[in-house]
Amino acid sequence: MARPASSWGWSPIGRRRWALVLLWVGHGAWVLSGPKAGGSWAAFTSAAARPVESLASAWRGWRLHRAERARDLAQAQTDLAAVRQRVQALETERMADAPRLADGESAVQMLGLKAKVPLRTEAARVLLAPVGVAFGGLILEGGKDRGFQQDQGVIAPEGVVGRLWSVGTTQSEVLPADAPNASIGVMLARSRATGVLQGLGSNRGEIRYLNNQEVVQPGEAVYTSGLDRVFPRGLLVGYVTEAKPGDLELKVTVALAAPLRRLPSVLILPLPTPEEAQAPLVPQAKAGGAS
Amino acid sequence: MKRALHLRPPGQRALAAGVCVLGLVLLAPWTGPQALLHAALVLGFALDPGSALLTAVWAAAGGWALEGTLRIYPHLGGTAWADMTIALAARWLLVEWPVDSLKGWLGRQAVLALAWILLVHLAVRIAAGPHLWGTAWVWVLLGLPAWGWLTWRWQRPGGR
């Protein structure tokens, strides 16, 4: 009679039995190890879990940081939108106030100029300043109704503008200083040499009747001489841009200081007072002279 | 001569034991019903007449699940070891001396339950130190008719 295979050998039944024994004995040993082993086990598991916990903590911190940044970004975007809206409102307000501001600045400049010029001047608003029109005149608000007369000088804070060419009932036309038929008595700042400025157009003019001997340099200021009896002496006219000797006289080109086509308002000078100096006596013919 | 056992299919046993383990986790807030289910698992659904290893595994799983949900012991494993021991003993009795009546089954379950309660307390005391008795053992003993009848029906397929 053959002996049955051992139930504890390397057979399916044996392996299951050994597994059962290991399971039961292992559990028993674990139970018998007591709470101290549990503490060691807990310490071991804590140490093993520390990297994962660190990663989880870092991950949580990163998410919190990201959430905080998202909140900050949302707040910043809200603030930015509010600031943009405010800037837009201010811009609109500024654009609405720009004409009044320009008028105010112009008025301040006019007041300053008026205080500088020791004459009784009248301010006038420029109604029309043709741009690109050759030698086009300025149209001023005010005419005979304000007492304007022909040939009154017109100046601006920047410099001489021209003279009144025609005076209507409520409006006046200005002959600008750069018109070819305009002439202004001028003098050079350094040499005090006097001449007559004639217009060349495009805010330029040429000084006539200057001797070739005069020393004139570009950039030199040009003032009114007062000899034309329209403008008082010493008003700025412009600056020399070019000076070269000609056949008979020095050719000096001047850039006018006042922007003739961009003036919001001007000052009207009074008419010159008549000269008090007596005219030279004319010798009378003797009675009964040569016949 | 030993009477032939009517074995349930392994899939049914695994399913029942798995549901019991899951139930132990889900019933964690209610320790009384959890104890009833625990007793039904260890002394009934975990018992596999065809495999002592599976019996021990399912009983240990129940013990670990219970202690894991309790979270009061500093050193786990005592309940699992006691469950395994009692379940192996119950399986051995089931295989060697099967009972034919409900009364006999309930009586045997009562004795096994009593031994199980004492063994669990002892094992947990060894593993985790002194601890309170609690009321789970009362639930187990008072609920014996319920879980005992349930395990009787489970171990006797067909109502025989």
Image (cartoon, coloured by chain):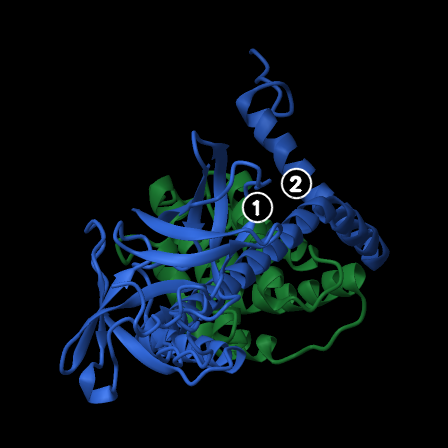
The residue type indicated by label 2 comes to Leu
The residue pinned by badge 1 equals B56
Calculate the distance from the C-alpha at mark 1 to the C-alpha at mark 2.
8 Å
Residue A23 has which mark?
2
* Rendering colour (chain A): blue
Helix, strand or loop status at disc 2: helix
Residue B100 visible within the image: no
Residues at marks 1 and 2 touching, judged by CB atoms closer than 8 Å: yes
Tell me where residue B123 appears, x and y as whole percent: 73, 60
The residue type indicated by label 1 comes to Ala
As drawn, B90 above or below A85: above
B97 or A226: nearer the viewer: A226
Q: Residues within 10 Å of mark 1 (few under 14, many from 20)?
A: many
Which quadrant does the N terminus of chain A fall into? top right
Tell me where residue A195 appears, x and y as whole percent: 46, 51
Q: On the image, which quarter does residue B103 sit in? A: bottom left
Residue at horizontal 46%, vertical 43%? B49
Q: Residues within 10 Å of mark 2 (few under 14, many from 20)?
A: some
Left or right of A191 on screen, residue A100: left
B110 or B71: nearer the viewer: B71
Residue A36 has which mark?
none
Which of the chains bears the disc numbered 2?
Answer: A
Left or right of A96 on screen, residue A227: right
As drawn, A7 above or below A279: above
Residue at horizontal 50%, vertical 68%? A233
Tell me where residue B77 appears, x and y as whole percent: 69, 55
Residue at horizontal 60%, vertical 25%? A14
* Rendering colour (chain B): green
Which quadrant does the C terminus of chain A fall into? bottom left
Tell me where residue A174 appears, x and y as whole percent: 25, 66
Helix, strand or loop status at disc 1: helix
